[in-house]
Amino acid sequence: MKKLMIYGATGYTGRMAAEHASAAGTPLILAGRTEATLASLAASLGVEYRVFGLEDIAMIDRSLEDVGVLLNCAGPFSKTAELLMTASIRNGVHYLDVAAELDGYRLAEALDGKARIAGVMILPGSGGSVAMLGCLAGHAIARTENPLSIRVAMHVSGGLSRGSAVSAMGSVTAETLARVDGKLVALAAGSIRKFDFGSGGVDCFQVTLPDLTTIWRATKVANIETFVHVTGEGFPQGDLSALPDGPSEQERLANRYQAVVEVTDAEGKVVRSVLDTVNGYTFTATAAAEAGRRVLAGEAQVGFQTPSMLFGNGFAETIADTTIVDV
């Protein structure tokens, strides 16, 4: 029987994804670099574990034996995605991750042809903002006849995990990008636009998100902009390695996420939809575990896919307490 492997299973998000996958009865292998923590988590869940780093290609290949789906939760993804994507293609294993860095999605585009030849699916962003915003955008676009542009904004609340902070620092870019006429274009930094997440308009900063690639790939709408509004502690300063593992369960419960999309059609009409969901870490782990379960069960298409393309625009609403409202 083929199994779902979670690499980085003892990290903050990986551990929660492993717990969700185990609870769903998904055949599971935990993996990572450190045996002591892997052995403890595997024993608590009653599953198998494998210890390997990413320096030895032969070891990676041996470790993927009897694995049908690999879920990469080991950030920074700039250091793990390429090695594990190419290993997955080599070994005929479907690849999933929870990355939020644009470069990983550019890599998936570049590897699309090789993955198709190998009969392998590449599904970066199987949980998190890519699943949230992709499904929200697809939902709103279905309400329009001829969509010309999309603006999406995410309201991030609460603190970051240590791993997210380190990954974010590693992917910081001076460029603010948007998709203009189908191409990624650099814009002047500092653009601010108001969006209403349900309690009145708030200032949102234009940022570069991977949804510039995934929403375009799923919808072919040629003009896309992405924004974020942050409340709570904001981005941590100082020694990131000294941060706690991540928000506590109580902190996650107290800090829900919202997102809004505005789709403008050829006649200038604007359609708006708002998504409300649990904390982003809870959503990410739950959605990634569910995506892994479904792909292992046979829901896969070869090449570079997005959650909304693979599972449909309703996927986000199947995760935890997630709703989309048209406004």
Image (cartoon, rainbow, N blue to C red):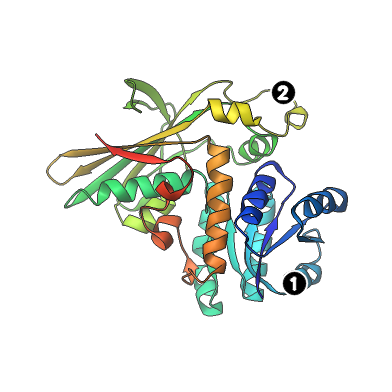
Residue 144, percent from left and from top: 19, 49
Kind of residue indicated by mark 2: Gly
Quadrant position of the N terminus in the picture: bottom right
Kind of residue indicated by mark 1: Asp
Which one is nearer the viewer's eye here, 173 or 196? 196
Tell me if 67 is positioned left or right of 125 in this view. Answer: right
Lower position in the chain sequence, tag 2 or tag 1? 1
Dot 1: what SS?
Answer: helix
State which quadrant residue 51 falls in: bottom right
Dot 2: what SS?
Answer: loop
Residue annotated with mark 1: 61
Residue 143, percent from left and from top: 21, 48
Residue 151, percent from left and from top: 32, 39
- Asked if labels 1 and 2 touch by Cβ distance under 8 angstroms, the answer is no
Residue 316, percent from left and from top: 42, 48
Residue annotated with mark 2: 238
Instruction: Tell me if residue 171 comes above or below residue 84 in the rendering.
Output: above
Q: Residues within 10 Å of mark 1 (few under 14, many from 20)?
A: some
Which one is nearer the viewer's eye here, 196 or 194? 196
Which one is nearer the viewer's eye here, 288 or 172? 288
Tell me if 145 is positioned left or right of 161 in this view. Answer: left
Quadrant position of the C terminus in the picture: top left
Whether residue 100 is visible to the viewer of this picture, yes or no, is: no
